[in-house]
Amino acid sequence: MLSALVAHAAAILLLVQSPASASKPADKAPPPCIVSGRVVTAAEGTPVASSRVALIPEHERRESQVYAAVSDSSGQFTISGVPAGRYQFLATHTGYVDQHYQSTGDDTGAILALQAGQEVKDVLFRMTLAAVFTGRVNDEDGDPMALMQVVALRRPTDEETDDRDDSRSTAQELVPAGFAQTDDRGQYRIFGLKAGEYYIRAVDDYEPMNHVIIGSEWEVRRALGSQYAPVYYPGVTQIGQAKLLVISPGEEAQVDLVLRRIKMVQISGRVIGADGKPATDAYLYLEELPAGDYGVATETDSKGEFRMKGVAPGGYLLHAQQHSTEEANYHASQKIEVGSDNIDSVVLALGRGVNFLGRLDVSGPGTTRFERMSINLISHGDQTGGAWARVKKDGTFQLLDVPDATFSFSMNGPEEGWYVRSVRLGTSDLLANGLEVEKGEGGGTIQVVVSNGGSELGGLVTQDDKPMVGARVRITPDPETRYNHLRTRTANTDQSGRFSFIGIAPGQYHVIAKASGPDREDAVASDPKSVSVAEHDHKTIELTVASPQTH
């Protein structure tokens, strides 16, 4: 009996050790990459110690990891353990403008593409000193004004103009580049600015910075309201009369402003909830038209009433939103023209729009986490807000109180490679025709289908038969409409002139590459190409950018 057991055990041991039955060794992980270089000043080439240098995945996901290092006293840095991939690459340091890899001006630079085990050496970041606006804000009697908001405004770059959602009719002509708040001496300091052209504006629009409230200042200021109109340097109320200021790298420009009292008005009224009762938990915001950086906010009281003091003459859009729960996100909007007289008895009724149910489904194999996604309806025009809903774990969602307007559909949160395949309300294709709500009529169930069959499109951009580093590639649906505009995508080329898009919805697209030098007049572009992609496609194309014109 014992000999039989020994023989059986020996047979088992032989079977386990047999090459035919031994499990295969696990595949080794691809070797990581190393990136190293120096950070120096652009003017003198001297080391910039303690700079933060970071690699950020080009196609960011929720679980994306940033790889970073700090430069030493000689400006040297090394980032180790970086997986192969495509990364945004930049260096930052207080007092300098953020420097992106291979950036030549207003552009966002090039992508750094890394192959498994690759070591990239001798990267050089040349840091340009940031510009500063500083000064004082006084009242008309020469007394300092504390806790005033001062903002530096600039024209959008070509990239920002390309990326703008043109479905909105009130897209800003100017964008904020930096903010500051005056101290008890009326002094402010806006730092970290690129050299360029700016407008400076001061607004008596006190909001506690970093949620720090000084004494009872917040309550008193909100109760009284402002008596000072927003002012552009050198002391005008209209942007068309403002002076454009030019500032150089490292320059600290002194810009003083004087706020003068004008007759401000009060807007008051009440908000009615979706249940017909006073909305005691509504938040109201008065938005300047056309879209600006000035507004007034308040909340309803225990009677559902509100009062906004210190409103300057002009055109506004008054928004009310019920914010007691995430589920009941009711809202209302009304356009208001403010003159020299108070406006009383404004009534905003929440919950008088159209409610839509919705369901998110998956087409084909694969699963995804619905609760990471949110649905957005983006309105066309400046007369109303949009609508938003978070998707639940079971794929259902609710769009409540959707106002009369025409909307484009968008979704946030799909994982890499996933795309919105279809959005339908009955027989209507919302991706093609949008969603129109008129006279409070409509409703129903919106069916959204997502798929992990997103396409990949990559390629090469050349100029004069050489790879073009840092070119900007843009794909737009063909034909592009006000409803599919949100499928437009942009990407930058890497150090080899290559670009990459992932998770593209199948369809027909126009593809074009652009590049701009230090002056906007130097911008060049390729001839557009037309490309058609299907699910799971992996296509490559080549774009040739024209040579810049010689003057």
Image (cartoon, rainbow, N blue to C red):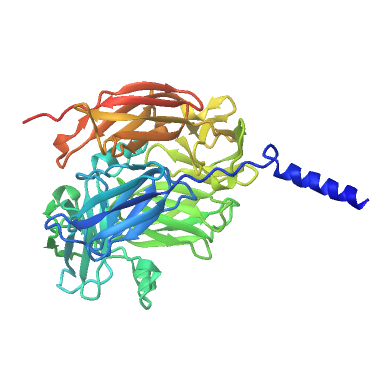
Front position in the image: 152 or 36: 36
Q: Quadrant of residue 178?
A: bottom left
Q: Residue furthest front?
A: 3
Who's the residue at 60% across and 52% down the image? 275
Quadrant showing the C terminus: top left
Task: Point out residue 386 in the picture as x, y percentages from the top left corner.
Answer: 46, 43
Image: 11 above or below 54: above
Image: 58 above or below 446: below
Is residue 503 left or right of 516 when viewed as pictured? right
Image: 242 above or below 132: above
Image: 399 above or below 46: above
Q: Quadrant of residue 91?
A: bottom left
Is residue 373 left or right of 51 when viewed as pictured? right
Who's the residue at 35% across and 76% down the image? 214
Front position in the image: 252 or 14: 14
Who's the residue at 44% across and 31% down the image? 456
Task: Point out residue 362 in the picture as x, y percentages from the top left corner.
Answer: 60, 34
Task: Point out residue 130 in the picture as x, y percentages from the top left corner.
Answer: 19, 58
Task: Point out residue 151 in the picture as x, y percentages from the top left corner.
Answer: 24, 58
Say if residue 432 shows up in the picture: yes
Q: Residue furthest right?
A: 1
Say if residue 312 shows up in the picture: no
Who's the residue at 38% across and 69% down the image? 223
Is residue 144 left or right of 441 when viewed as pictured? left
Q: Residue furthest left?
A: 551
Front position in the image: 339 or 280: 280
